[in-house]
Image: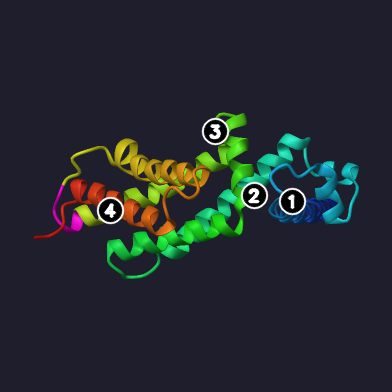
Amino acid sequence: MTSRASAETDGRTARWAGHRDRRRAAFVEAAVAVIDEVGPGASVEQIAAAAGVTRQVLYRQFDGRGDLDEAVVEHAATLVYERVMTDLDGDDDIVAVLRRVLDGYLDFIDEHRSLYWFTRSHESERAESQAVDQVKDRLAQVAIAMAEELLDQRGLTAPVPLDTVFAVGLIGMVDASVSRWLVRPGTTSRAQLVDGLVLMLTGAIDAVIPPVA
């Protein structure tokens, strides 16, 4: 094969791969919209209808329902990560940042309640979704980087491992508290939840990174 023919073949392959990726992304967005509308039990037929294709055409882009579900979970996890990273921006004090992040996360859940439960059910069925696990790891790395910067500024050394204890503990605390709150509506107000989490999170942060006297 000549170099020109090879380049043309590579170009067609790249264009086809790009088309397939865009097609797959469009189907995932359709699935998210359907799940938001009808609930976490949305069927493949409903998703295909919303995308304007047949079930068979939809499955040409996925290796079965499990692959489609994982793609939806990955998309949802990415949306959460982007939301958190946006809310982290700013030069406010730590309390204001924590409150903004928590409020933003809860707003996202309010906007996508069915998608949230879809993601949680997917986690329970497969022990831990790889996509969700990866996002938790990315958020943990952000927490670690911020902690290291504060420790360096204050000339301190972390009294606990930042990766396996500090960051994981902060994320786990929020995740467990929010999940519990959602399955027991009415027992605690949203304001009480946020206030309590801010109090516990700042206490944990101050324990590891004492504020400047």
Q: CA distance from mark 4 to mark 3?
A: 28 Å
Pointer 3: residues within 10 angstroms few (<14), some, or many (20+)?
few
Which SS class for mark 2? Answer: helix
Q: Which residue is mark 1?
A: 38
Which SS class for mark 3? Answer: loop
Pointer 1: residues within 10 angstroms few (<14), some, or many (20+)?
few
Which SS class for mark 4? Answer: helix
Q: Which residue is mark 4?
A: 199
N-term-proximal mark, 1 vs 4: 1
**Dots 1 and 4: beta carbons under 8 Å?**
no
> Quadrant where the C terminus lies?
bottom left
Which numbered tag is attached to residue 128?
A: 3
The location of residue 181, given as percent across then percent down, is 46, 46
From which residue to which does the magenta span run? 152-156
**Dots 2 and 1: beta carbons under 8 Å?**
yes
Q: Is 63 on the left-hand or right-hand side of 75?
A: right
N-term-proximal mark, 4 vs 3: 3
Pointer 4: residues within 10 angstroms few (<14), some, or many (20+)?
some
* Three-letter code, disc 2: Ser
The location of residue 111, given as percent across then percent down, is 60, 59
Q: Which residue is mark 2?
A: 114
Pointer 2: residues within 10 angstroms few (<14), some, or many (20+)?
many
Q: CA distance from mark 2 to mark 1?
A: 8 Å
What residue lies at 51% left-to-right and 54% top-to-bottom? 81
